[in-house]
Amino acid sequence: MVPLNRALSKLGILSRAQATEAIRAGRVRVDGRVVTNPAASVVPERVRISVDGERRTRAAWRAILFYKPRGVVTTRRDPEGRTTIYDVIGPSAKGLIAVGRLDLATSGLLLLTTDTRLAHRITDPGSGVPRVYLVTVRGRVTDEEAGRLDAASAVVRKASARETHLIVELRRGRNREVRKLFESIGHEVATLKRVRFGGLELGDLRPGQWRDLTRTEVEAAFLQPDLTSPQETPRVRSYA
């Protein structure tokens, strides 16, 4: 037996947080009865679970690579009425959960999948999955300053008194981490785009576009030992 919110997550129906919210709002029924306790124990294989009146079973495995536009939020619903990634993707996003988040002002590569185990593994702080960003900050950042950043790698591509362009690689995925790194050395981030996540790259996608991924692509991108090793030398030449 597992908690109901975890059951919904394991089935790939909702993320744990989304499931908790839906359960508390009275949107979830188990064997026809509304259950409002996220911790209520169930055996997923032996009960009928419905959300918003729709019977839910394990979602088929699927993953997509999405180019999140700037100004779009990485949530299913936004209380402020802002455009969400699910609004942009539309019906094709049914059953998918975002693996991590990109903030409102950040664009670039976002992975969505029905595989909650994969999502948890990738976003675990100890996974060391590389995330590569193209960053533009206000003011000049010297090579010495870039070298002091608490990042796996920070390479200055072009610098002037007005702004500096860099390639930054992180291995943790903390909230607003890139912005906080540059704030720590007195520079404001003007634009931020993620161009690589694990072994996945944006390629020819344009903002708002996405493509389906195969299991083989995902396994090669995230489950290979050399892609999650903290000792790996960052690949940045293709973005220079």
Image (cartoon, grey):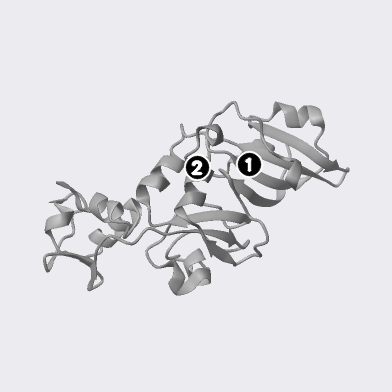
Residue 153 figure quarter: top right
Most extreme residue toward the front is 216
Structural crowding at the residue carrying mark 1, measured as other residues with C-alpha within 10 Å and reported as few (<14), some (14–19) or many (≥20): many
Q: Which residue is mark 1?
A: 178
Helix, strand or loop at label 1? It is helix
The circle on residue 222 is 2
Q: Is residue 100 visible?
A: no
Q: Which amino acid, mark 2?
A: Phe
- Please report whichever mark, 2 or 1, sits nearer to the chain's N-terminal start: 1
Q: Which image quarter: residue 203?
A: bottom right
Asked if residue 82 is positioned above or below residue 230 in the image, the reply reads below
Q: In the figure, is residue 189 to the left or right of 225?
A: right
Q: Nearer the viewer, residue 104 or 157?
A: 157
Disc number lying in front (2 or 1): 2
Q: Nearer the viewer, residue 172 or 103?
A: 172
- Residue type of the residue flagged with mark 1: Val
Direction from residue 70 to residue 101 in the image, left or right = left
Query: Above or below — where is 99 with respect to 57?
Result: above
Is label 2 in a helix, a strand or a loop? helix
